Image (cartoon, grey):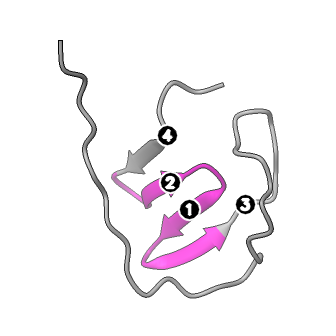
């Protein structure tokens, strides 16, 4: 398992589990090598109209 929920590639943009944004096109990656989230019924093809990214920090 990976230690991060969201990865951001300089070349491709954000990746969240099985969801990848490449050149402003969102793709569902069905390949599972053990570091993906479980399938919850999201269709393989869809349009993302908007998304928000939040930073979560741990308070000591």
Which of the marked residues, 3 or 4, is nearer the chain's N terminus? 4
Residue 11 highlighted magenta (yes or no): yes
Assess whether mark 2 and mark 1 are in contact (beta carbons under 8 angstroms): yes
Instruction: Give the structural element (helix, strand or loop) at label 4.
Output: loop
Which of the marked residues, 4 or 1, is nearer the chain's N terminus? 4
Front: mark 2 or 4: 4
Front: mark 4 or 1: 4
Considering depth in this image, is 10 or 38 the residue closer to the camera?
A: 38
Residue 15, horizontal then vertical, whole percent: 50, 54
Residue 14 highlighted magenta (yes or no): yes
38 vs 34: above or below:
below
Instruction: Give the structural element (helix, strand or loop) at label 3.
Output: loop
Please tell me how many numbered marks the rendered image carries: 4
Residue, disc 3: 29
Residue, disc 4: 5
Q: Residues within 10 Å of mark 2 (few under 14, many from 20)?
A: some
Which of the marked residues, 2 or 4, is nearer the chain's N terminus? 4
Q: Residues within 10 Å of mark 3 (few under 14, many from 20)?
A: few
Assess whether mark 1 and mark 3 are in contact (beta carbons under 8 angstroms): yes
Question: Label 2 vs label 3: CA separation?
Answer: 10 Å
Instruction: Give the structural element (helix, strand or loop) at label 1.
Output: strand
Residue, disc 1: 20
Residues shaded magenta: 10-27
4 vs 18: above or below:
above
Residue, disc 2: 15
Q: Residues within 10 Å of mark 4 (few under 14, many from 20)?
A: few
Residue located at (51% from left, 79% from top): 25
Of all residues shown, which one is farthest toward the left? 60
Q: Quadrant of the N terminus?
A: top right
């Amino acid at each position: 398992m990976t230690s991060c929920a969201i990865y951001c590639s300089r070349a491709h943009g954000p990746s969240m589990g099985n969801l990848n944004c490449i050149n402003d096109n969102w793709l569902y990656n069905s390949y599972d090598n053990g570091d993906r989230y479980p399938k919850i019924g999201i269709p393989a093809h869809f349009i993302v109209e908007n998304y928000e990214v939040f930073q979560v920090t741990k308070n000591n």
